Amino acid sequence: MTISLVLRDQRLLARIINLAPRFGCSLARLDARTSDDLTLATFKLEGEADALRRLDAKIAQLAALDAEFAST
Amino acid sequence: MIAIRGGAHAVLEALEAEGVQTIFGYPGGAIMPLYDALYGHSIRHVLVRHEAAAVFAASGFARTTGRVGVCCATSGPGATNLVTGLLDASMDSIPLVAITGQVRSTLMGTDGFQEADVCAITQPVTKANILIRDPKTIAREMRRAFAIASGGRPGPVLVDIPSDILKAAIDHAESASFTIAMPHVPIVDRTAIARAADLVRRAKRPLAIVGGGVRRGEEAVAQYRRLVAMLGVPHTATINGLGAGEPGDHHYLGMLGMHGSKAANLAVHRADVILALGMRFDDRVTGRTDKFAREAAIVHADIDPSEFSKIIPASVSLAGDLAATLRALCDELERSRIPRFDDWGDEVARIWAPPPSDKVDGLSATTIMDRLFAIAPGDTVVTTDVGQHQMWAAQRVRPDHPRNFATSAGLGAMGFGLPAAIGAQFAQPERNVVTVVGDGGFQMSLTELATLRRYKLPVKILLIDNRNLGMVRQWQELFYNERYSATNLSDNPDFVAIAKAYDIHADVLDCEDDIDRSIAAFLAHDGPMLLHCVCYPAENVWPMIPVGGAIDEGIESKP
């Protein structure tokens, strides 16, 4: 599973790295760069389909919160 | 003329701007500038006896009012002592703002005295955390913290402020002007509402399950009651949704889940449509997910879209504020034929029975609970600690509003009950506040008897003392071949003597004949009181779905 994110809070990279093994997944590759105040990150995550689905949902929640904070 | 004041004063001004009147905390080195600003200030600071109690008290305040609870602590150990309470609030979506002092900016990262990277530590347990590096941003960041905590799906926010920032002089004019947008809340999707209404119209055995999302506002409770009354539909609640139904509604089936009522769990099993409203399908609710509501189409309403299909696949997802969603669904149903499900509701309501109890050789905790909730008025605010007594209370309590029952549900954090009751009593001094605690959890927080005494809080503590860590003991009995490892508390202290040492009135209940008289006197006592109930040590919580069991596989006694 490959997920590309635009993050306001760079610390979420660490959060997602920590989350992956909690879902029984592993990080195969991470590309990240910062431009202005945004971090552009692409995660390649591996694991069983159901674990990846649940991890994807959790990452979506974090990304939504990150976007929400940017608006506040 | 330029007004100059310190960063700590800016923090208090920000709290005042949010309408905060009470904060719970414990002082220490790095946060001393804030405590200096609090000296003589109109914001009331409640001194607890451990930072964990500060965050639980703030949580009790928030859970029973819907307002943001505020706590504060110093750097390092003070901040790390907040972690459990922050996670508890995060799990149950409780709006909190925690303010922590931090070592001065030049010491950060050097392993300074009482330094902790609290933002890193609390990242997984908060909705957001904010390290303030510039005193001019204090007002804006505090406003942002409250907006994030209370907006959208509520949650805890931690604001970490180095001591030099708290001491720094601020030019008022430089920090006065800013705007903060509230977090986005999804707008109700009319198409999805129409699909949900269509499912309800075609249903034969629908069931509503309400969760903690209903506590977000009065309107959500009103619209929930409108929906279930309109349809005559049977309904059940998660532990965080208790009290959402109209008191006395005979289609209310009690709590569902691991220790839920047989009627509620069988209704889930037989339902063909489930309206899952502001709940998140916790594993204590679902049991085995592959056997949960196998015949039902799920209509899932939640403010957080990431909850949809996380555990149980949803046929229709309704993202948005629960009150708005329910109003739209009721309105949509009223546009055409309104189905009624009274026969189905009556059928499952007839299954309902009081939770079964063990036959015991001594004072029964469940009998005490039965009598407590029969005698206490419905508007009593009840908090619990965690363990068997929590489940016994949840099975029996009949609050007339979901904000009248506060418990550490998702996290199950022992030590919650008493400090949460303190927060609830400060929030609503005129209300009767009762906390039900066990002998294990009470010993994690009984230092807060000092807080009761200092502030003369009339909190009533019902101590269910079975001289065991009862829930763990129950599992050891049922699933670990009766190997009672580290659960025996037969050397408990004299709780009445402890209470009296804190100048708290206390009494003992150890005889069934005295239950009603003792509870009546306990509730009527003018001031704080401990009622120490000396209970049979091996009474279990029934019904129970064994771990790995399905929701219809509950057992009502030891096999």
Image (spheres, coloured by chain):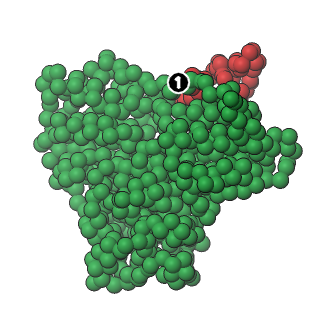
Chain colours: A red, B green
In percent of width and height, residue B8 lies at 68, 43
The amino acid type of the residue labelled 1 equals Ala
Quadrant of the snapshot with the C terminus of chain A: top right
Q: Which residue position holds label 1?
A: B181
Residue at horizontal 63%, vertical 62%? B50
Q: How many marks?
A: 1
- Asked if residue B410 can be seen in this view, the reply is no
Asked whether B302 or B144 is in front, the reply is B144
In percent of width and height, residue B258 lies at 40, 54
- Asked if residue A41 can be seen in this view, the reply is yes
In percent of width and height, residue B398 lies at 29, 57
Query: Which residue is situated farthest in the top direction here?
Result: A35
Q: Measured along the vertical axis of the image, is residue B197 above or below residue B436?
A: above
Residue at horizontal 28%, vertical 49%? B264
Asked whether B515 or B251 is in front, the reply is B515
Secondary structure found at label 1: loop
Decide if residue B400 is on the left or right side of residue B132.
left
Decide if residue B439 is on the left or right side of residue B36.
left
> Which quadrant would residue B308 be assigned to in this image?
top left
Residue at horizontal 44%, vertical 75%? B530
In percent of width and height, residue B482 lies at 51, 72
